[in-house]
Image: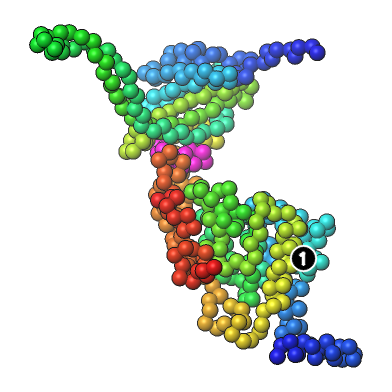
Protein backbone atom coordinates (compact mmCIF):
# COMPACT_ATOMS: atom_id res chain seq x y z
CA UNK A 1 0.00 0.00 0.00
CA UNK A 2 1.29 3.36 -0.93
CA UNK A 3 0.14 6.32 1.02
CA UNK A 4 -2.38 8.49 -0.69
CA UNK A 5 -0.95 11.83 -1.75
CA UNK A 6 -1.90 14.61 0.60
CA UNK A 7 -4.55 16.86 -0.84
CA UNK A 8 -2.96 20.14 -1.65
CA UNK A 9 -5.93 21.82 -3.29
CA UNK A 10 -7.48 24.49 -1.10
CA UNK A 11 -11.06 23.90 -0.03
CA UNK A 12 -12.02 27.48 -0.55
CA UNK A 13 -10.73 30.43 -2.44
CA UNK A 14 -9.17 30.31 -5.88
CA UNK A 15 -5.94 31.30 -7.56
CA UNK A 16 -6.37 35.03 -7.21
CA UNK A 17 -8.59 35.40 -4.17
CA UNK A 18 -6.88 37.31 -1.36
CA UNK A 19 -7.43 36.17 2.24
CA UNK A 20 -10.43 37.70 4.04
CA UNK A 21 -8.24 39.98 6.13
CA UNK A 22 -6.94 41.59 2.92
CA UNK A 23 -10.47 41.94 1.55
CA UNK A 24 -11.46 43.59 4.82
CA UNK A 25 -8.57 46.05 4.48
CA UNK A 26 -9.51 46.74 0.84
CA UNK A 27 -13.13 47.49 1.84
CA UNK A 28 -12.10 49.79 4.67
CA UNK A 29 -9.76 51.65 2.34
CA UNK A 30 -12.26 51.82 -0.52
CA UNK A 31 -15.54 52.51 1.28
CA UNK A 32 -15.14 55.30 3.84
CA UNK A 33 -16.96 54.67 7.09
CA UNK A 34 -17.65 50.98 6.45
CA UNK A 35 -17.34 48.78 9.53
CA UNK A 36 -16.20 45.27 8.67
CA UNK A 37 -15.47 42.39 11.02
CA UNK A 38 -14.01 39.01 10.12
CA UNK A 39 -15.87 36.01 11.53
CA UNK A 40 -13.56 33.03 11.58
CA UNK A 41 -14.73 29.55 10.73
CA UNK A 42 -12.67 27.04 12.68
CA UNK A 43 -13.86 24.02 10.68
CA UNK A 44 -11.65 22.45 7.95
CA UNK A 45 -13.57 24.35 5.27
CA UNK A 46 -12.11 27.56 6.74
CA UNK A 47 -14.77 29.65 5.05
CA UNK A 48 -14.27 32.85 6.97
CA UNK A 49 -16.91 35.50 6.46
CA UNK A 50 -17.18 39.26 6.57
CA UNK A 51 -19.72 40.91 8.85
CA UNK A 52 -20.85 44.21 7.36
CA UNK A 53 -22.73 47.10 8.91
CA UNK A 54 -26.16 47.55 7.39
CA UNK A 55 -25.65 51.24 6.63
CA UNK A 56 -22.74 50.72 4.21
CA UNK A 57 -23.67 47.24 2.98
CA UNK A 58 -24.89 48.44 -0.43
CA UNK A 59 -21.70 50.46 -1.03
CA UNK A 60 -19.52 47.56 0.07
CA UNK A 61 -21.43 45.22 -2.25
CA UNK A 62 -20.88 47.54 -5.20
CA UNK A 63 -17.21 47.89 -4.25
CA UNK A 64 -16.73 44.10 -4.14
CA UNK A 65 -18.53 43.67 -7.45
CA UNK A 66 -16.53 46.32 -9.29
CA UNK A 67 -13.07 46.06 -7.68
CA UNK A 68 -10.62 45.02 -10.44
CA UNK A 69 -8.89 42.37 -8.25
CA UNK A 70 -12.08 40.89 -6.81
CA UNK A 71 -14.81 41.29 -9.49
CA UNK A 72 -17.35 39.33 -7.39
CA UNK A 73 -19.95 39.44 -10.14
CA UNK A 74 -22.06 36.47 -9.08
CA UNK A 75 -24.14 35.94 -5.93
CA UNK A 76 -24.73 32.20 -5.90
CA UNK A 77 -26.60 31.97 -2.62
CA UNK A 78 -28.47 34.15 -0.17
CA UNK A 79 -30.02 32.70 2.95
CA UNK A 80 -31.32 33.66 6.36
CA UNK A 81 -30.28 32.50 9.83
CA UNK A 82 -32.22 33.00 13.04
CA UNK A 83 -30.18 33.56 16.18
CA UNK A 84 -32.27 33.46 19.33
CA UNK A 85 -31.73 35.61 22.40
CA UNK A 86 -29.00 33.98 24.47
CA UNK A 87 -27.97 34.14 28.09
CA UNK A 88 -24.48 33.45 29.34
CA UNK A 89 -23.59 32.72 32.92
CA UNK A 90 -20.14 33.28 34.32
CA UNK A 91 -18.71 32.89 37.78
CA UNK A 92 -16.87 35.93 38.98
CA UNK A 93 -14.80 36.20 42.12
CA UNK A 94 -15.72 39.36 43.96
CA UNK A 95 -14.22 40.77 47.12
CA UNK A 96 -16.89 41.53 49.67
CA UNK A 97 -16.95 42.75 53.24
CA UNK A 98 -18.65 40.08 55.32
CA UNK A 99 -19.55 40.02 58.99
CA UNK A 100 -17.38 37.44 60.71
CA UNK A 101 -18.63 35.05 63.41
CA UNK A 102 -17.01 37.17 66.10
CA UNK A 103 -18.71 40.34 64.95
CA UNK A 104 -15.66 41.78 63.20
CA UNK A 105 -15.85 42.76 59.55
CA UNK A 106 -13.70 40.73 57.22
CA UNK A 107 -12.94 41.07 53.56
CA UNK A 108 -13.29 37.72 51.77
CA UNK A 109 -13.51 36.49 48.23
CA UNK A 110 -16.99 35.41 47.22
CA UNK A 111 -18.03 33.70 44.00
CA UNK A 112 -20.89 35.39 42.23
CA UNK A 113 -22.88 34.06 39.27
CA UNK A 114 -23.49 36.75 36.70
CA UNK A 115 -26.03 36.34 33.95
CA UNK A 116 -25.73 38.40 30.80
CA UNK A 117 -28.46 38.56 28.19
CA UNK A 118 -27.50 38.90 24.54
CA UNK A 119 -30.30 40.00 22.20
CA UNK A 120 -30.89 37.74 19.22
CA UNK A 121 -30.85 38.83 15.62
CA UNK A 122 -31.71 37.71 12.13
CA UNK A 123 -28.82 37.24 9.75
CA UNK A 124 -28.64 37.41 5.97
CA UNK A 125 -25.76 35.46 4.42
CA UNK A 126 -24.52 36.03 0.86
CA UNK A 127 -22.08 33.76 -1.00
CA UNK A 128 -20.22 35.62 -3.73
CA UNK A 129 -18.15 34.25 -6.59
CA UNK A 130 -16.36 35.77 -9.54
CA UNK A 131 -17.14 34.31 -12.93
CA UNK A 132 -14.49 36.51 -14.51
CA UNK A 133 -11.66 35.73 -12.08
CA UNK A 134 -12.89 32.19 -11.30
CA UNK A 135 -12.56 32.57 -7.57
CA UNK A 136 -14.74 32.54 -4.52
CA UNK A 137 -16.62 32.25 -2.32
CA UNK A 138 -16.52 35.45 -0.36
CA UNK A 139 -19.16 35.27 2.34
CA UNK A 140 -20.98 38.36 3.60
CA UNK A 141 -23.17 38.54 6.67
CA UNK A 142 -25.64 41.24 7.61
CA UNK A 143 -27.39 41.31 10.96
CA UNK A 144 -30.60 43.00 12.06
CA UNK A 145 -30.75 44.93 15.32
CA UNK A 146 -33.14 42.42 16.90
CA UNK A 147 -35.67 39.73 16.01
CA UNK A 148 -38.88 41.63 16.73
CA UNK A 149 -39.32 45.21 15.51
CA UNK A 150 -36.02 46.20 13.92
CA UNK A 151 -35.67 43.56 11.22
CA UNK A 152 -34.72 45.82 8.31
CA UNK A 153 -31.66 45.22 6.14
CA UNK A 154 -30.65 46.80 2.85
CA UNK A 155 -31.48 44.67 -0.16
CA UNK A 156 -28.55 43.60 -2.32
CA UNK A 157 -30.83 42.70 -5.24
CA UNK A 158 -29.95 45.98 -7.04
CA UNK A 159 -26.32 44.79 -6.98
CA UNK A 160 -26.85 41.11 -7.74
CA UNK A 161 -30.15 40.34 -9.48
CA UNK A 162 -29.82 36.65 -8.52
CA UNK A 163 -30.61 37.56 -4.89
CA UNK A 164 -34.16 38.63 -5.74
CA UNK A 165 -36.08 35.39 -5.11
CA UNK A 166 -33.81 34.34 -2.27
CA UNK A 167 -34.31 37.61 -0.44
CA UNK A 168 -38.05 37.12 -0.92
CA UNK A 169 -37.67 33.66 0.61
CA UNK A 170 -35.76 35.06 3.60
CA UNK A 171 -38.48 37.70 3.98
CA UNK A 172 -41.16 35.01 3.82
CA UNK A 173 -39.63 32.43 6.14
CA UNK A 174 -37.55 34.60 8.53
CA UNK A 175 -39.23 37.99 8.39
CA UNK A 176 -36.18 40.00 7.32
CA UNK A 177 -37.43 43.16 5.56
CA UNK A 178 -35.11 44.10 2.70
CA UNK A 179 -35.25 47.84 2.02
CA UNK A 180 -34.82 48.62 -1.66
CA UNK A 181 -35.99 45.23 -2.90
CA UNK A 182 -37.96 45.70 -6.15
CA UNK A 183 -40.73 43.21 -5.35
CA UNK A 184 -40.77 42.15 -1.71
CA UNK A 185 -43.65 39.69 -1.42
CA UNK A 186 -44.00 36.25 0.14
CA UNK A 187 -42.73 33.61 -2.27
CA UNK A 188 -43.57 30.23 -0.70
CA UNK A 189 -46.40 30.88 1.75
CA UNK A 190 -49.61 32.63 0.72
CA UNK A 191 -50.10 36.37 1.06
CA UNK A 192 -52.45 36.26 4.09
CA UNK A 193 -50.00 34.17 6.12
CA UNK A 194 -48.59 36.07 9.11
CA UNK A 195 -45.95 33.76 10.65
CA UNK A 196 -42.34 33.15 9.68
CA UNK A 197 -42.02 29.36 9.77
CA UNK A 198 -38.22 29.03 9.72
CA UNK A 199 -37.80 31.06 12.89
CA UNK A 200 -36.67 28.90 15.77
CA UNK A 201 -39.56 29.94 18.01
CA UNK A 202 -42.23 29.21 15.37
CA UNK A 203 -45.13 27.08 16.61
CA UNK A 204 -47.20 25.36 13.90
CA UNK A 205 -51.01 25.52 14.17
CA UNK A 206 -52.77 22.82 16.20
CA UNK A 207 -54.24 21.10 13.15
CA UNK A 208 -53.20 17.56 14.02
CA UNK A 209 -56.54 16.15 15.20
CA UNK A 210 -55.14 12.61 15.50
CA UNK A 211 -52.41 13.68 17.89
CA UNK A 212 -53.92 16.53 19.88
CA UNK A 213 -51.41 18.34 22.03
CA UNK A 214 -48.40 17.66 19.84
CA UNK A 215 -48.63 21.13 18.33
CA UNK A 216 -50.40 23.05 21.02
CA UNK B 1 -83.28 -14.04 -2.23
CA UNK B 2 -80.03 -12.86 -3.80
CA UNK B 3 -78.50 -16.31 -3.24
CA UNK B 4 -81.52 -17.97 -4.85
CA UNK B 5 -81.11 -15.75 -7.90
CA UNK B 6 -77.42 -16.55 -8.10
CA UNK B 7 -78.13 -20.29 -7.95
CA UNK B 8 -80.82 -19.94 -10.56
CA UNK B 9 -78.39 -18.04 -12.79
CA UNK B 10 -75.76 -20.78 -12.44
CA UNK B 11 -78.39 -23.45 -13.11
CA UNK B 12 -79.59 -21.64 -16.22
CA UNK B 13 -76.07 -21.14 -17.52
CA UNK B 14 -75.45 -24.89 -17.21
CA UNK B 15 -78.37 -25.30 -19.59
CA UNK B 16 -77.01 -22.80 -22.08
CA UNK B 17 -79.06 -19.81 -21.05
CA UNK B 18 -77.07 -16.69 -20.20
CA UNK B 19 -78.74 -14.23 -17.84
CA UNK B 20 -77.47 -11.08 -16.22
CA UNK B 21 -78.70 -7.99 -14.39
CA UNK B 22 -78.51 -4.34 -15.33
CA UNK B 23 -76.42 -3.72 -12.22
CA UNK B 24 -73.84 -6.31 -13.24
CA UNK B 25 -73.49 -5.00 -16.79
CA UNK B 26 -73.36 -1.41 -15.56
CA UNK B 27 -70.69 -2.10 -12.95
CA UNK B 28 -68.72 -4.35 -15.30
CA UNK B 29 -68.52 -1.51 -17.79
CA UNK B 30 -67.60 1.07 -15.17
CA UNK B 31 -64.91 -0.95 -13.43
CA UNK B 32 -63.13 -1.75 -16.68
CA UNK B 33 -62.99 1.80 -17.98
CA UNK B 34 -61.83 3.88 -15.03
CA UNK B 35 -60.27 6.98 -16.51
CA UNK B 36 -57.82 8.63 -14.11
CA UNK B 37 -56.97 12.30 -14.10
CA UNK B 38 -53.52 13.29 -15.40
CA UNK B 39 -52.44 14.62 -12.06
CA UNK B 40 -49.20 14.17 -10.17
CA UNK B 41 -47.84 15.98 -7.13
CA UNK B 42 -44.43 14.51 -6.28
CA UNK B 43 -42.24 11.43 -6.59
CA UNK B 44 -45.26 9.08 -6.31
CA UNK B 45 -46.34 10.46 -9.69
CA UNK B 46 -43.20 8.94 -11.23
CA UNK B 47 -44.30 5.53 -9.95
CA UNK B 48 -47.77 6.24 -11.32
CA UNK B 49 -46.26 7.02 -14.72
CA UNK B 50 -44.20 3.81 -14.53
CA UNK B 51 -47.43 1.91 -13.81
CA UNK B 52 -48.93 3.11 -17.07
CA UNK B 53 -45.86 2.20 -19.13
CA UNK B 54 -45.21 -1.08 -20.94
CA UNK B 55 -43.63 -2.99 -18.08
CA UNK B 56 -46.59 -2.70 -15.67
CA UNK B 57 -49.18 -1.75 -18.30
CA UNK B 58 -52.17 -0.33 -16.49
CA UNK B 59 -54.05 -0.70 -19.81
CA UNK B 60 -54.70 -4.31 -18.80
CA UNK B 61 -57.18 -2.90 -16.28
CA UNK B 62 -58.85 -0.49 -18.70
CA UNK B 63 -57.38 2.53 -16.97
CA UNK B 64 -54.75 3.67 -19.44
CA UNK B 65 -56.68 6.71 -20.69
CA UNK B 66 -55.40 9.49 -18.44
CA UNK B 67 -57.61 12.50 -19.04
CA UNK B 68 -56.13 15.98 -18.96
CA UNK B 69 -59.43 17.47 -17.78
CA UNK B 70 -61.27 16.72 -14.53
CA UNK B 71 -64.54 16.89 -16.49
CA UNK B 72 -63.63 13.64 -18.26
CA UNK B 73 -62.06 11.77 -15.35
CA UNK B 74 -63.55 9.15 -13.03
CA UNK B 75 -60.61 8.83 -10.66
CA UNK B 76 -58.11 11.18 -9.09
CA UNK B 77 -54.88 9.57 -7.89
CA UNK B 78 -53.45 11.90 -5.26
CA UNK B 79 -49.88 10.88 -5.96
CA UNK B 80 -47.55 12.75 -3.68
CA UNK B 81 -47.15 15.40 -1.02
CA UNK B 82 -50.15 17.71 -0.74
CA UNK B 83 -48.82 21.04 0.46
CA UNK B 84 -51.18 23.41 2.23
CA UNK B 85 -50.83 25.77 -0.69
CA UNK B 86 -51.89 23.02 -3.13
CA UNK B 87 -54.71 21.49 -1.04
CA UNK B 88 -57.47 23.93 -2.18
CA UNK B 89 -56.61 23.17 -5.81
CA UNK B 90 -56.81 19.41 -5.21
CA UNK B 91 -60.26 19.79 -3.63
CA UNK B 92 -61.34 22.07 -6.48
CA UNK B 93 -60.22 19.51 -9.09
CA UNK B 94 -62.15 16.82 -7.24
CA UNK B 95 -65.24 19.04 -7.17
CA UNK B 96 -64.98 19.54 -10.93
CA UNK B 97 -65.09 15.80 -11.66
CA UNK B 98 -68.45 14.33 -12.68
CA UNK B 99 -70.09 11.61 -10.60
CA UNK B 100 -69.42 8.78 -10.02
CA UNK B 101 -65.89 9.73 -8.94
CA UNK B 102 -63.25 7.96 -6.92
CA UNK B 103 -60.08 8.88 -5.05
CA UNK B 104 -56.90 6.87 -4.51
CA UNK B 105 -54.54 8.42 -1.95
CA UNK B 106 -51.14 7.17 -3.06
CA UNK B 107 -48.18 7.09 -0.72
CA UNK B 108 -47.34 8.12 2.82
CA UNK B 109 -47.68 11.87 2.14
CA UNK B 110 -51.11 11.72 0.54
CA UNK B 111 -52.55 9.50 3.27
CA UNK B 112 -51.00 11.20 6.32
CA UNK B 113 -48.40 13.83 5.47
CA UNK B 114 -45.71 11.15 5.66
CA UNK B 115 -42.21 12.29 6.61
CA UNK B 116 -43.36 15.92 6.34
CA UNK B 117 -46.26 15.54 8.78
CA UNK B 118 -44.69 17.82 11.38
CA UNK B 119 -43.74 20.46 8.82
CA UNK B 120 -45.48 23.79 8.59
CA UNK B 121 -46.40 23.50 4.92
CA UNK B 122 -47.77 19.98 4.39
CA UNK B 123 -51.35 18.77 4.70
CA UNK B 124 -51.66 15.82 7.09
CA UNK B 125 -53.55 13.64 4.61
CA UNK B 126 -55.95 14.49 1.78
CA UNK B 127 -58.73 12.52 3.52
CA UNK B 128 -59.27 15.62 5.65
CA UNK B 129 -61.05 17.33 2.76
CA UNK B 130 -62.23 14.72 0.23
CA UNK B 131 -63.52 11.15 0.68
CA UNK B 132 -60.75 8.66 -0.14
CA UNK B 133 -61.72 5.23 -1.50
CA UNK B 134 -58.36 3.45 -1.36
CA UNK B 135 -55.28 4.36 0.69
CA UNK B 136 -51.88 3.00 -0.39
CA UNK B 137 -49.00 3.18 2.10
CA UNK B 138 -45.40 3.31 0.91
CA UNK B 139 -42.76 5.87 0.11
CA UNK B 140 -43.24 5.68 -2.80
CA UNK B 141 -45.50 2.65 -3.31
CA UNK B 142 -44.27 0.34 -6.05
CA UNK B 143 -46.32 0.06 -9.27
CA UNK B 144 -47.60 -3.31 -8.02
CA UNK B 145 -49.09 -1.51 -5.01
CA UNK B 146 -50.85 0.98 -7.26
CA UNK B 147 -52.17 -1.87 -9.41
CA UNK B 148 -53.40 -3.55 -6.23
CA UNK B 149 -55.17 -0.33 -5.29
CA UNK B 150 -56.76 -0.29 -8.74
CA UNK B 151 -57.98 -3.85 -8.33
CA UNK B 152 -59.33 -2.96 -4.87
CA UNK B 153 -61.18 -0.03 -6.40
CA UNK B 154 -62.54 -2.27 -9.17
CA UNK B 155 -63.87 -4.69 -6.56
CA UNK B 156 -65.44 -1.76 -4.74
CA UNK B 157 -67.12 -0.52 -7.94
CA UNK B 158 -68.30 -4.04 -8.77
CA UNK B 159 -70.00 -4.36 -5.39
CA UNK B 160 -71.90 -1.08 -5.59
CA UNK B 161 -75.70 -1.35 -5.88
CA UNK B 162 -77.58 0.93 -8.20
CA UNK B 163 -80.56 1.05 -5.86
CA UNK B 164 -81.44 0.19 -2.30
CA UNK B 165 -80.48 1.87 0.96
CA UNK B 166 -76.79 0.88 0.67
CA UNK B 167 -76.30 2.48 -2.72
CA UNK B 168 -73.15 4.63 -2.99
CA UNK B 169 -72.91 8.30 -2.19
CA UNK B 170 -73.33 9.56 -5.75
CA UNK B 171 -76.74 7.89 -6.04
CA UNK B 172 -78.05 9.60 -2.92
CA UNK B 173 -79.59 12.89 -4.00
CA UNK B 174 -79.18 14.40 -0.54
CA UNK B 175 -75.45 13.66 -0.21
CA UNK B 176 -72.89 16.14 -1.47
CA UNK B 177 -70.86 15.67 -4.63
CA UNK B 178 -68.78 18.76 -3.96
CA UNK B 179 -66.86 19.50 -0.80
CA UNK B 180 -65.89 22.86 0.72
CA UNK B 181 -62.59 24.21 -0.52
CA UNK B 182 -60.35 25.16 2.44
CA UNK B 183 -59.27 28.78 2.67
CA UNK B 184 -55.81 30.20 3.34
CA UNK B 185 -55.84 31.42 6.93
CA UNK B 186 -53.35 33.47 8.90
CA UNK B 187 -51.63 30.40 10.37
CA UNK B 188 -52.82 27.50 8.21
CA UNK B 189 -55.76 26.15 6.25
CA UNK B 190 -59.23 26.95 7.55
CA UNK B 191 -60.87 24.71 8.50
CA UNK B 192 -58.07 22.27 9.35
CA UNK B 193 -60.35 19.39 8.36
CA UNK B 194 -63.87 18.78 7.07
CA UNK B 195 -65.55 16.68 9.75
CA UNK B 196 -68.18 15.43 7.24
CA UNK B 197 -65.38 13.66 5.40
CA UNK B 198 -62.57 13.12 7.90
CA UNK B 199 -64.14 10.32 9.88
CA UNK B 200 -60.86 9.42 11.58
CA UNK B 201 -60.88 12.58 13.70
CA UNK B 202 -61.28 11.65 17.38
CA UNK B 203 -63.85 14.42 17.97
CA UNK B 204 -65.96 13.45 14.97
CA UNK B 205 -69.48 12.28 15.88
CA UNK B 206 -69.44 10.12 12.73
CA UNK B 207 -66.39 8.15 13.89
CA UNK B 208 -66.99 4.41 13.92
CA UNK B 209 -66.09 2.97 17.32
CA UNK B 210 -64.46 -0.45 16.97
In the image, is residue A167 part of the stretch drawn in magenta? yes
Residue drawn at point x = 56 percent, y = 63 percent: B127
Residue A94 as seen in the image, left or right of residue B177: left
Q: For residue A71, say whether it is visible.
A: no
Q: Position of residue A4 (x, y in %)?
A: 75, 14
- For the residue pair B17 and B48, the one nearer the viewer reads as B17
In this view, A162 is above or below B144: above
Query: From which residue to which does the magenta span run?
Result: A165-179
- For the residue pair A200 and A67, the one nearer the viewer reads as A200
Residue B65 as seen in the image, left or right of residue A215: right
Residue drawn at point x = 76 percent, y = 58 percent: B144
Q: Which residue is mark 1?
A: B64
Q: Quadrant of residue A148?
A: top left
Residue drawn at point x = 57 percent, y = 23 percent: A137
The prevailing secondary structure element of the residues shown in magenta is helix
In this view, A195 is above or below A120: below
Residue B134 as seen in the image, left or right of residue B28: left
Q: For residue B119, say whether it is visible.
A: yes
Work out which residue is located at the far left of the displayed protein and give it: A103
Q: Position of residue B210 (x, y in %)?
A: 54, 68
Residue B160 as seen in the image, left or right of residue B95: right
Q: Secondary structure at mark 1?
A: loop
Determine the chain carrying the residue at label 1: B
In the image, is residue A175 part of the stretch drawn in magenta? yes
- What crowding class fits label 1: few (fewer than 14 Cα within 10 Å), some (14-19), or many (20 or more)? some
Q: Quadrant of residue A197?
A: top left
In this view, B190 is above or below A63: below
Amino acid sequence: MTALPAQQAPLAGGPGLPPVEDIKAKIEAGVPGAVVAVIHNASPSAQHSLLLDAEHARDVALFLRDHPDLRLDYCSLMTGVDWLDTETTEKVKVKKVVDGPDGSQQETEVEEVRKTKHPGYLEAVYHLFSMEKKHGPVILRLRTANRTDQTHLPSLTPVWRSAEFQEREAFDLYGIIFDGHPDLRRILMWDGFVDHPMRKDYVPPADDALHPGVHA
Amino acid sequence: MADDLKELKIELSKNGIFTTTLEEVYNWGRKNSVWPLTFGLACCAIEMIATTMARYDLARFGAEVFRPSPRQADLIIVSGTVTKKMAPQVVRLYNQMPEPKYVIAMGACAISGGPFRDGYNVLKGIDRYIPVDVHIPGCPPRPEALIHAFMTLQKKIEAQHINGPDRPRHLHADQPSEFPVPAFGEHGLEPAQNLDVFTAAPNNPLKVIQ
